[in-house]
Amino acid sequence: MSNNEFDILDELYFVTSYPDLKCTLSLNDAELCTALQSLIAQGYVRILYPDQDTEHEYNEAEFGEKCQHYFYLASKAGLVVHNSI
């Protein structure tokens, strides 16, 4: 797990919007979206959209265009990995 991915998981114990995540971390859009995409593909992060209560299925083709509109939450697997490092 990269440092960026670890830092992102650290912020996702609760549902967090993309703008809040970007404000908290010192990553540009490309770095943040790439790290989020990697975490989602590994099953460590869930996407919520259009609101904080609705889980949204990951679609690799549209993720790059829409990653800034989603809410994010660490999955149980993501929390376990984060806490074991």
Image: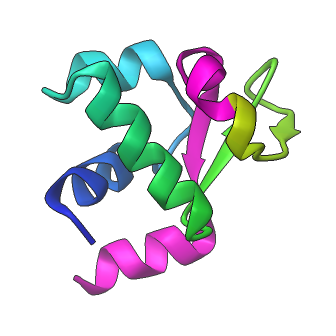
**Image position, residue 68 (x, y; %):** 53, 17
Q: In this view, does 33 lie above or below 8?
A: above
Q: In this view, does 22 lie above or below 72?
A: above
Residue drawn at 19 percent across, 28 percent down:
27
Total marks placed:
0
**Image position, residue 37 (x, y; %):** 51, 48
Residue drawn at 39 percent across, 17 percent down:
20
Decide whether the magenta segment is chiefly helix, strand or loop: helix
Residue farthest bottom in this picture:
84
Q: Is residue 64 left or right of residue 62?
A: left
Q: In this view, does 26 lie to the left or right of 82?
A: left
* Quarter of the figure with residue 50: top right
Q: Is residue 13 left or right of residue 8?
A: right
Residue farthest front in this picture:
61
Q: Is residue 15 above or below residue 36?
A: above
Q: Give the range drawn in magenta.
A: 63-85
Residue drawn at 62 percent across, 15 percent down:
69
Q: Is residue 14 magenta?
A: no
* Quarter of the figure with residue 1: bottom left
Which is nearer the eye, 33 or 47?
A: 33
Q: Quadrant of the C terminus?
A: bottom left
**Image position, residue 67 (x, y; %):** 57, 25
Q: Is residue 23 above or below residue 63?
A: above
